[in-house]
Structure formats: C-alpha cells, structure tokens
Amino acid sequence: MTTVDLPRVSVTDAPLGGPSLPQERRLVTAIPGPKSQALSARKTAAVSAGVGVALPAYIVAAGGGVLIDADDNSLIDLGSGIAVTGVGNSAPRVVAAVAAQLAQFTHTCFTVSPYDSYIEVAEALNRLTPGDHLKRTALFNSGAEAVENAVKFARSFTGKQAVVAFDHAYHGRTTLTMALTAKNVPYKDGFGPFAPEVYRAPMSYPLRDGGLNGVEAAKRAILQVEKQVGAGNMAAMILEPIQGEGGFIVPAPGFLPTLLEWCHANNVVFIADEVQTGFARTGDMFASNHEGIVPDLIVLAKGIAGGLPLSAVTGRADIMDAPKPGGIGGTYGGNPLACAAALATIESYESDNLVNRAREIGAIMTERLGALQQADARIGEVRGRGALMAIEIVDPATGEPDALLTGRVAAAAHAQGVIVLTCGTYGNVIRFLPPLSIPDHLLFEGLQVVADALGAL
C-alpha cells in the first residue's frame, strides 16, 4: 500500500499545563532503547509474567503530549495511560494540590476519621453527572471496585440478584467484573469460576448489525433478557455508553434510551459504566449526555483524578442510601491525596474548557482518519466521539476483522515513537486517546505516523 498524507487543519502549538518539556517526537535510540531493555530484564526477573507491557519504553518524565523514556526518546502519547491523563501527566493544579495535601496528612481512612475533601468530591460529582435529581456518591480506588459496588447498591435497593451486561463489554478484572466482561483472552482465560447471576445480551454494533437501528437492537436485547433472565429477577443492567476495550463501539441512536425506558418500567437499575468515557473525553463531560440519558447509577474512574487512583459511584439517592451503614467502604477509598487530585482535576476540566478541547481534538481526528479511510479500504470504520476515536481494520474483500495487520500497525507506530493502543473483541481496532493537553502539531504528526505505518504494510 502507498502512504497517504493526511490533510491538516488549524494548529495550536502550546500544550495545556504540565512541565515545560519540548513538545516534539524525538528518537535517540531504537524503541525500546538499551536502558529500557535493561529495565525490561529487571522486570522479567522481579514482576509477575502475568503483568504485560504494551511498549517497554520506561518513562522518566511526561507532560503536554509527550512521554520521555529512560533513553531520552520523546514519544507522542496517543493513549493517556488508557484515558486517565485527560488533564495531562503532571497538570500544575494537580501537582500543587497533591503536594499541599501531602504536607498535611496522607491517610486516616474516611470511614474511621473523615475529612472534608471526600465530601467536596462527592458534591462535585453530584453536581456534574447527568440529571438534576437528588444524588449521593461513594468513593473507591479502581473502576472495577466501583463497578462491583454499583452492583451491590442495585441488589440492595431492588432485592433482586441478576445482572445483565452486553457483548463486547469490559468492566474489570476482579471476580465479579470478569463475569461482566465479555472478552476471554486475556481477561478471563484460566481464572474461573466466575460470579453467578450474570447474564449477557447483544450489543448494538452498527458496523456488524446488518442495518439494525438502535431501537431495533435494543428490542432484540430486551427480548433475550425477558426470555432468558426475566425482569422480575434483574437487579441491574450495566453497559458502557461507548464501549472501551470492546472496540470503541458507539451504539446506534435510540439504543440506550430504549433500554433505559425498559429498565425504569421494570424496576431494574440502569448503570452507566463511564470509567473510560467520563470527564470530557467524548466532547461532553459524560458520554451519557450525547444520548440525553440519565442513568440511575454512573461509575467513574480513570480521568477523575489526574493519574491518582480514585473511582466513584454516583446516582439516585434512594438507591445509594439502600445499603446498611457500614455496608459500603474500604481502607483506601477516597484517599485524601486522590481527593485533592480529583478536585484540582475537575477544576482543570472546567476552568480550561477541556470539553471544548476534546471536541477540537475529535474534529481533527475525524477529518484525518476519515481521509485515511477514503484512501484505504482496510479501514472498515472510523468511530468514536471527541478525544475517544478508533479505526477498525478489516479484510477489504470480506469485511472480516484483521487482527494481524492491526498488531503490525501498532508495533510500527511504537517503533516510530507514537504510543497507540489496540482493542476490540476481535483484536482489530486501534484506539486513539490523546491527552487533552496535547498540542495540535503532535496530534497531526502522531496520526501521520500511524497512516504511514498502515500504508507501508
């Protein structure tokens, strides 16, 4: 295939916040370089082999849109640590807030000796999340932990047990969340048995649904749920408004509202897992807003705290208040350092207008990836919203997924100093999750490197 020069649009060179690192792609050594290779050898000797690494270039500094590795290579970051560093890897507000909290205290356990920053984070999430109803929030450490607790809230409130998740879903790696997650390798293989009372329904996947619209796809899922599970047994339905690890699948319009309406009619708690889509990533503060839906519970993590471990469940007060006092909690949930980071991160999203920045990034990626699709029939679809975009790579003759080519494109981009991630049930999707602090010229360059890699294969 020949390479394609993608069109350029307006350029903003200045990164939003972070250390004053040169915003450039710079290759000093092969990737990974000798120092990173030495660290990889130490990793092999000291770390479980089950902990994999996508690109073993070991990072020593980061900011704006670049990561600097141990060999002084400057890599373009189109992954954001899997959608975590929306405000950048070392946003000034976050650094200052964490440093100030560090000087005060690091831990007391909120359920033993509480502190006000936990309450402030809860108040902010109650304000920001969809809907103007009365809400409550509980804080945890990881997305998977928050998902598990969302299910606990739903079961406590409804008195029912069954939970329905969807094809291509990813909700975590713990025992319950592995049951909710659809993909076997690498997330589930060899780790069973899984938690019971978890069922699966078909997702709206426009590229592979044979023309089924969103309402029709929802009715298909509802029919299966009613026949195989029964609404009278269901505590909750959980889904990602845009699926993440499953391939950045954007359901057809009408799919989410139809499911939400059915849940409300049948006393089933509708849980939106916005771990990857939340906090400005999709060009709105939350992806649920694109479809105008108001989930009963919303699960949050990743972009919530500028890189510190924090997650949350926010939702209807009657559901959140259902468990007995002491039934919800954890030693580190809502850690004071993470809460300080979250408050600074939320301030950055709002004060720096990062929702609009995500839309600008989305416009650039849509135009450039769309041009690439027009020139290369191996791109079956360009999809996503805002700074959460993907290309699905297929065999142009059959439309079947091409995971081998996808892996080769990602490896070629890595070798040229551009961090991209693959995903999808079939392993044939390249996803783009640049930090919202990335300057436009790096975004252009990174996308061109990916286009050149595809064109050379």
Image (tube, helix red, strand yellow):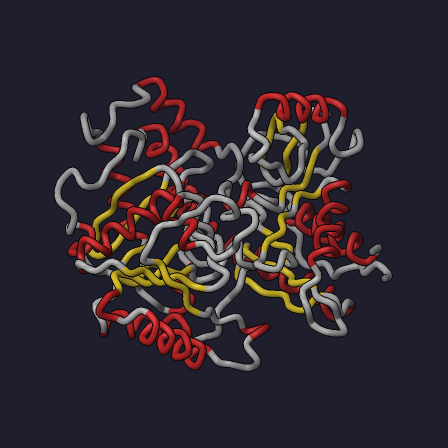
Where residue 233 appears, as percent x and y from the top left, is 24, 66
Where residue 257 appears, as percent x and y from the top left, is 35, 73
Is 364 on the left-hand or right-hand side of 415?
Answer: left
Please indicate, yes or no, whether residue 162 appears anywhere in the rendered image: yes
Where residue 70 appears, as percent x and y from the top left, is 68, 24
Q: Is residue 84 above or below residue 248?
A: above
Which of the pair 303/378 is nearer the observer?
378
Which residue extends farthest right?
2
Is 298 on the left-hand or right-hand side of 181?
Answer: left
Image point 66% across, 23% down: which residue?
A: 39
Image point 66% across, 49% down: which residue?
A: 443
Image point 65% across, 47% down: which residue?
A: 420
Dividing the picture into quadrants, the one containing residue 388 is bottom right
Image point 34% across, 45% down: which residue?
A: 146
Which residue extends farthest left?
324
| Quadrant location, the C terminus | bottom right
Please indicate, yes or no, whether residue 364 appears anywhere in the rendered image: no
Is 281 on the left-hand or right-hand side of 26?
Answer: left
Which residue extends farthest top?
103
Report how many numbered discs are placed on residues in the image: 0
| Quadrant location, the N terminus | bottom right
Where residue 352 appears, as percent x and y from the top left, is 46, 46
Q: Is residue 302 above or below residue 235?
A: above
Dividing the picture into quadrants, the one containing residue 95 is top left
Is 273 on the left-hand or right-hand side of 135?
Answer: right
Which of the pair 86/300 is nearer the observer?
300
